[in-house]
Image (tube, rainbow, N blue to C red):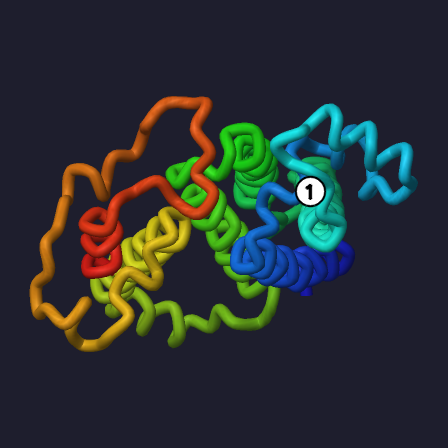
Amino acid sequence: MKNKWFYRLTWTALVLTFAVVLLGAYVRLSDAGLGCPDWPGCYGHLDVPDEAHQIAKANEAYPERPVEAHKAWKEMIHRYFAGTLGLLILAMAALAWRNRREPDQPVVLPVLLLGLVIFQALLGMWTVTWQLKPVVVMGHLLGGLATLSLLMWLALRQGRYSGDAVIAQARSLRVYAVLGLILLVGQIALGGWTSANYAALACPDFPTCQTYWWPPTDFQEAFTLWRGLGVSYEYGVLDNNARVTIHLMH
């Protein structure tokens, strides 16, 4: 067994990342992504304002986003978990760097994970400040799953899962694995794009879509990645044809 503390930190971070991904999905599906309109706090607080004067002040500061405590708490709990994960991965990167001269101590992956988590924090901030811009929401989803995947890879490398026979067999399947990974990432990205544009219910029937085998579509509008700032994307801004296009492609 390699560095015992690093191994334990890796598995702890892996479990915590899974929890963060689930919480993020719950926040998204319960329409709580803008439950706190600022970042990293919530209406200027480290928790959700609950006193009458705090709520009045928050509503005055954000009249377009009055306090909805049930949504705000979902968002803040997600942030608490994500912040804890960030500190844990920082500790992993620091420990890996300190022990970098030890044989078999991973260094590149922990440092890469630290950079990814920092970028994830920026995406989390932009998700709120740019009001659920779809390209940011999709990127945040991909970043979370990339973090989970890299931690799993790191955990397996630290364990006893690398026999010579297994490695030889894995090399023979490399092309299929890469192809499968590309298809999987593409499908996840399309799923994130579908959710971020509120297109999940664009086709309420199956296998047809709105009773058509191929309904009217609009690819240009459906896959425009950047539409500028200052627009709220909550509940979507695309018309029916664009949402149908996204749903069909997914």
> Which x, y percent locates residue 42?
75, 36
Task: Decide: is 36 above or below 248.
Answer: above
Q: Residue at x 31, y 73 (%)?
A: 169
Q: Residue at x 33, y 63 (%)?
A: 201
Q: Is residue 229 visible?
A: yes
Screen quadrant of the N terminus: bottom right
Residue type for callout 1: Gly
> Which x, y percent locates residue 125?
59, 32
Q: Quadrant of residue 94?
A: top right
> Which x, y percent locates residue 100?
65, 39
Q: Residue at x 36, y 23 (%)?
A: 228
- Other-residue count near label 1 (Cα within 10 Å), few / some / many at <14 / 14–19 / ≥20: many
- Which residue position is annotated with label 1? 86
Q: Quadrant of residue 250?
A: bottom left
Element class at badge 1:
helix
Task: Decide: is 81 above or below 227.
Answer: below
Viewer-side residue, 149 vs 160: 149
